[in-house]
Image (cartoon, rainbow, N blue to C red):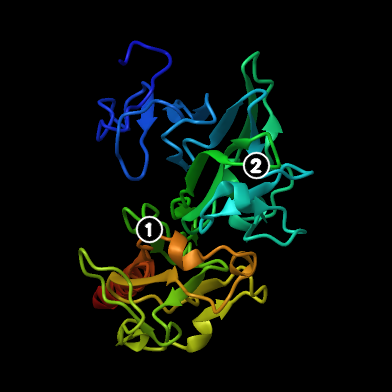
């Protein structure tokens, strides 16, 4: 199987023998299993997942696929003359909500239908301008649409949407292939002294780490528009560092236990509310005598209703087990140079006094 450049998954086979981590092709099964069938099917190879529908009467109608920062391309191939890509849109930016029951019923937002399509941009982070479905040439048998999502636009939470193929006859249109696509959240990441948090199921496999020193005395925590800082009373309390534990909202350890002269103004929040960004800065001369550690972080908050929900996308239904972005902060001890300089000065003074006394004795 691994030697073939094109692989078909049988629904009766519970999983493909090719490992997810291998360099070879990976079959993407259907969500519910069932009788054997090979059409339609999805195949992942390298950074691209390709879903193909050969026949409008194919029995494996419902498929699943995943897009991630490492596998960020999706191609939908529909049999010419019989089928066409769905959902349709003039700018190529439409996808259907994950709550869509039948792809054929998903229509442009400007129409009244059972399920209206949404723009792919509403599921992404940042301000993507050129993320859309593009004609991929196809061949004599298939029309092909391709979506490529740049790594920097992957969301901070897991998302889902639906696309596929429907029959070309608009009068008696039917769903031929319906692909539920999981848009996997990016991983939390630290760049220099800034932590950018994400909350997907695979976003926080390890804690982020920051070290504060007298020379590098601040760090920034970016929770983003989907996150909320931990602990809730972050200006006064922190979470004690403990292996296997994440930051939480109810931690009660007081900063005054680490910093005798601590003030809540050491924490500042950026004025841009969308960024939900916080900076912690230790003033000069306020580092502790001994090294200290504490934890803070961000977790996914549940808004009353955000833009995706307004467009018919249920974020709570999409997100599978959000994870906590935890930051282990190490505070270095105050620089020993001052004490060393003082000791050196005292030694020199004593030496001078001894020399003077010796001179008088002579």
Using the rendered image of the protein, determine whether residue 41 is visible from the camera's viewpoint.
Answer: yes
Q: Residue at x 36, y 21 (%)?
A: 24
Q: Are marks 2 and 1 in contact (CB under 8 Å)?
A: no
Residue 261: x and y in percent read: 41, 89
Q: Which quarter shows the N terminus? A: top left
Q: Nearer the viewer, residue 214 or 75?
A: 75
Residue 17: x and y in percent read: 25, 26
- Left or right: residue 85 versus residue 175 is right
Q: Which quarter shows the C terminus? A: bottom left
Q: Nearer the viewer, residue 209 or 22?
A: 22
Q: Residue at x 54, y 50 (%)?
A: 102
The residue carrying pointer 1 sits among few (fewer than 14), some (14 to 19) or many (20 or more) residues within 10 Å by Cα, namely some
Mark 1 element type: strand
**Residue wearing tag 1:** 208
- Left or right: residue 160 versus residue 248 is right
Query: What label does residue 172 carry, if any?
Result: 2
Residue 101: x and y in percent read: 51, 54
- Left or right: residue 230 versus residue 177 is left
- Disc 2 versus disc 1: nearer the observer: 2
- Left or right: residue 190 versus residue 276 is left
Q: Compare marks 2 and 1 and give the one earlier in the sequence.
A: 2
Q: Nearer the viewer, residue 211 or 63?
A: 63
Q: CA distance from mark 2 to mark 1?
A: 54 Å
Mark 2 element type: loop
Q: Is residue 124 above or below residue 9?
A: below
């Amino acid at each position: 199987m691994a030697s073939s450049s094109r692989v078909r998954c049988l629904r009766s086979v519970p999983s493909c023998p090719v490992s997810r981590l291998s360099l070879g092709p990976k079959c993407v099964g259907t969500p519910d299993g069932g009788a054997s069938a090979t059409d339609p099917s999805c195949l992942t190879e390298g950074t691209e997942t390709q879903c193909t529908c050969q026949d409008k009467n194919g029995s494996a109608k419902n498929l699943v696929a995943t897009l991630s920062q490492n596998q960020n391309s999706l191609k939908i191939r529909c049999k010419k003359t019989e089928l066409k890509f769905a959902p349709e849109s003039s700018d190529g930016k439409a996808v259907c909500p994950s709550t869509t029951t039948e792809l054929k019923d998903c229509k442009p937002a400007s129409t009244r239908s059972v399920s209206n399509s949404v723009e792919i941009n509403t599921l992404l982070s940042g301000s993507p301008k050129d993320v859309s479905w593009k004609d991929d040439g196809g061949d004599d048998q298939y029309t092909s649409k391709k979506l490529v999502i740049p790594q920097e636009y992957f969301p901070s939470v897991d998302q889902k949407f639906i696309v596929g193929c429907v029959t070309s006859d608009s009068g008696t249109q039917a769903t031929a292939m319906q692909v539920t696509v999981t848009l996997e959240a990016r991983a939390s990441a630290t760049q220099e002294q800034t932590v950018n948090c994400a909350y997907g199921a695979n976003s926080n496999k390890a804690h982020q780490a920051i070290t504060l020193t007298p020379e590098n005395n601040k760090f920034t925590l970016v929770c983003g528009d989907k996150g909320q800082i931990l602990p809730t009373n972050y200006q006064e309390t922190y979470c004690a560092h403990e292996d296997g534990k994440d930051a939480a909202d109810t931690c009660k350890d007081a900063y005054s236990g680490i910093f005798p002269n601590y003030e809540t103004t050491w924490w500042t929040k950026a004025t841009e509310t969308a960024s939900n960004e916080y900076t912690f800065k230790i003033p000069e001369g306020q580092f502790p005598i001994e090294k200290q550690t504490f934890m803070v972080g961000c977790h996914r908050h549940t808004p009353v209703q955000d833009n995706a929900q307004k467009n018919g996308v249920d974020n709570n239904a999409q997100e599978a087990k959000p994870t906590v972005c935890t930051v282990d902060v190490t505070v270095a001890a105050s620089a020993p140079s001052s004490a060393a300089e003082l000791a050196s000065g005292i030694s020199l003074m004593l030496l001078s006094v001894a020399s003077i006394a010796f001179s008088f004795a002579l």
